Image (cartoon, helix red, strand yellow):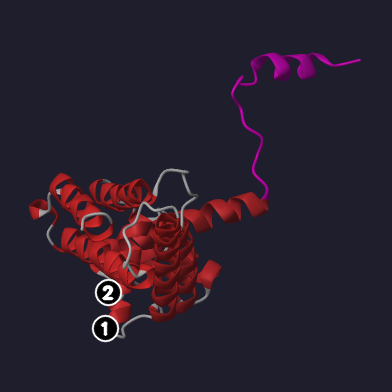
Amino acid sequence: MPTHDDLTARTTAPPDAQPRRTQAERRAHAEAALLAAAARLIAEHGSTGVTLARVGEEAGFSRGLATHYFGSKAALLARLQEEALAEAMAAAAPERSGAGAVEELYGFARGVLDGVRNPTDLGRAFVVLGAEALAGASGLTAAVAELDSRMRGWVADVVGQGAAEGEVRGGVDPQAFAFAFVGLLKGLVVQAAAAPEAFDVAVATAEAQRWIRLALVAD
């Protein structure tokens, strides 16, 4: 038989009360918050001046929690790079939509440049870390090269299929186009990061689309 206290507890407990999280869930939540804080700080200030203590404070925890979970700044950066690379890789080789080659590439360019309008902290951190990698200041060099290679491979496949279907004019080298296309988009993203107030996403998108058509279709 339930006691009076049992019945009282059932009727007075908040209807939206959530069960207490397990230790593993609490750790996952804390790690996610620390990684998000690290991404914000790196996006704003670069990785050099970011410390584990500062990351802990930014995340709303103690100064020592990031050290407790990650052990070192190098380990935290490695984990952040993994998360950022996973996000970038998903965007670099999206599922094919079934549209023609030109429309596929239009959509890809739009997606990349739309991301300039409302970039994620993780995406902004990846751009910063990528720039540091080019200067030899981060361990992301190999990851950036892998990302570029994957993106070029996707673009070359799209162009190659377009050529086989007769949409892309003869004489277009899919690999060469892929190098130029990825270089164009990366250059635009870097310009947007350097001077966002002067970067017009709509103009950049329209010009990228015009270039794609000229390169692939116009004689």
Query: Which residue lies at the image location 54% right of the left edge and 67% below the top edge?
Result: 69
Which quadrant holds the N terminus?
A: top right
Q: Position of residue 180 (x, y in %)?
A: 27, 69
Residue 42 in sight from this viewpoint: no
Q: Residue furthest left?
A: 198
Residue 132 belongs to the span the image colors magenta: no
Q: Secondary structure at mark 2?
A: helix
Q: Secondary structure at mark 1?
A: loop
Q: Quadrant of residue 62?
A: bottom left
173 versus 11 height, above or below: below
Which residue type does callout 1 highlight?
A: Ala
Crowding around mark 1 (Cα neighbors within 10 Å: few <14, some 14 to 19, many 20+) is few
Residue 160 in sight from this viewpoint: yes
Name the foreground residue: 33 vs 180. 180
Query: Which residue lies at the image location 40% right of the left edge and 59% below the top edge?
Result: 163
Q: Residue furthest bottom?
A: 136
Which residue type does callout 2 highlight?
A: Ala
Q: Position of residue 164 (x, y in %)?
A: 45, 58
Which residue is identified by label 2?
131
Q: Position of residue 18 (x, y in %)?
A: 62, 32
- Taking 95 as reference, is 169 left or right? left
Residue 17 belongs to the span the image colors magenta: yes
Which quadrant holds the C terminus?
A: bottom left
Which residue is identified by label 1?
135
Name the foreground residue: 5 vs 207. 207
Task: Determine whether label 2 and label 1 are within 8 Å by CB.
Answer: yes
The Cα–Cα distance between marks 2 and 1, rounded to whole angstroms, is: 7 Å
Crowding around mark 2 (Cα neighbors within 10 Å: few <14, some 14 to 19, many 20+) is some
Q: Which residues are magenta?
A: 1-22
